[in-house]
Amino acid sequence: LANRRRRMDLGAKAREELKHTSADDLASNLVKYKEDLIPIQLHDLTFHRRGRKILDCVNIAAPQGSVVAVISDERAGKATLMRLLSQSLMPQEGTVFVPPHLRILQVCDAPHLVPGNLLANLTFGVSIDKHAVEEHHPSLELIQPARLRDICMKLGMGAGLLQQLQKETAE
């Protein structure tokens, strides 16, 4: 309950700060919605297990859309940090604030694939069925095949995989 209250307070504070954001601020940050300016935040985050401090007073503010690499020695708390960000663990002290419209993506060392084709793995969690989106979640956006291909090309996906993706998005 205390963690929920702290997250709600951080969310209210972030929304209050957005009230003073102008259209020029949005344009200069290349964002469409004010909510896209709310950073992911860790404030005085401390976590310990079995008497051992795993994370001690961590403070981070990462803008939405940024790629953040967490690099450290083995058993230094990377997996714990990711579990705290995804809120599958709650901190003993401090706060984790992820704007409610965001998802945290963790890329592991070993790939994990969902059953299905390439498209299903690249778009896991995003709706493909326009009817389902319109009927159940009209605010959700559908997969944009051209945008998906552009992203894959920028990431250096091989020609064979790009052809497979082209085939699957055309179906």
Image (cartoon, grey):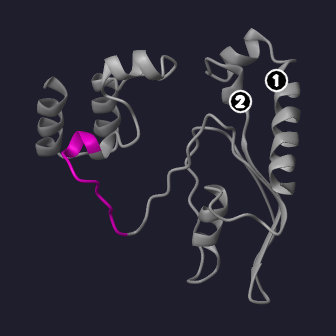
Is label 1 in contact with label 2 (beta carbons under 8 Å)? yes
Disc 2: CA contacts within 10 A as few (<14), some (14-19) or many (>=20): many
Q: Does the magenta stretch include residue 118?
A: yes
SS at mark 1 in the image: helix
Q: Residue at x 86, y 33 (%)?
A: 12
Amino acid carrying label 1: it is Leu
Q: In this view, does 12 lie above or below 109?
A: above
Task: Give the distance between the C-alpha atoms of the residues marked 1 and 2, in whole angstroms.
Answer: 8 Å
Classify the position of the N terminus by image quarter.
bottom right
**Which of the 4 image quadrants contains residue 32?**
top right
The answer to whether 119 appears left or right of 1 in the picture is: left
In front here: 86 or 36? 86
The residues colored magenta run 110-120
Q: Position of residue 37 (x, y in %)?
A: 71, 29
Q: Which residue is drawn at 44% across and 59% down?
A: 107
Label ID, residue 37: 2
Label ID, residue 18: 1
Label ID, residue 40: none
SS at mark 2 in the image: helix
Amino acid carrying label 2: it is Leu
**Which of the 4 image quadrants contains residue 122?**
top left
Residue 163 seen from this side: yes
> Does the magenta stretch mainly form a helix, a strand or a loop?
loop
Residue most extreme to the top:
23
Disc 1: CA contacts within 10 A as few (<14), some (14-19) or many (>=20): some
Q: Does the magenta stretch include residue 165?
A: no
The answer to whether 49 appears left or right of 146 in the picture is: right
Classify the position of the C terminus by image quarter.
top left
Q: Which of marks 1 and 2 is nearer the N terminus?
A: 1
